[in-house]
Amino acid sequence: MRHLFAIAVVSAVFASGCTWVHMAPGASSVRVLGAGAAPSSCEKRGEISVSVKDRLGFYERNDLRVREELETLARNEGPGLSADTIQPLDVPRDGSQRFAAYRCGGTSR
């Protein structure tokens, strides 16, 4: 039983260091704006809701890693909405977050 517990703990530690979400083709060109007022010179293309696991059993994952994965997932969705810019609409909560998607066409923001 102790051996099984040790394996579970080691697995959780190694899993916390892994990035589970990878950037999709085209997503690297999607820019991320800081939270705040919507960009005035952009067309809103929709909203994106994304979620990841924020805990593995009793182990809470690193908050920064969860935020990075949520942002990557949102960027991955941008090209499907013909969006080149995303902006968070709220803070991550329980591994979920919402983003607004915009088409800014390379204009200065």
Image (tube, helix red, strand yellow):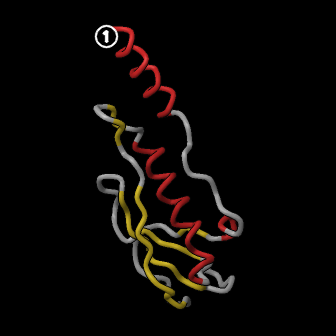
Depth order, front residue of 21/8: 8
- Residue at horizontal 40 percent and vertical 73 percent from the top: 36
For residue 48, above or below residue 40: above
Depth order, front residue of 65/107: 65
Q: Which residue is mark 1?
A: 1
Residue 24's image quarter? bottom right
- Residue at horizontal 66 percent and vertical 85 percent from the top: 107
- Residue at horizontal 40 percent and vertical 44 percent from the top: 63
Question: What is the three-letter code of the residue carrying label 1?
Answer: Met
| Secondary structure under the numbered disc 1 in the rendered image | loop
Q: Is residue 7 left or right of residue 57?
A: right
Please state the horizontal and vertical placement of residue 75, each as a whole percent of the image: 57, 66
Residue 80's image quarter? bottom right
- Residue at horizontal 34 percent and vertical 40 percent from the top: 55
The quarter of the rendered structure image containing the N terminus is: top left
Please state the horizontal and vertical placement of residue 60, each as a whole percent of the image: 34, 36
Please state the horizontal and vertical placement of residue 88, each as a whole percent of the image: 42, 68
For residue 1, above or below residue 37: above
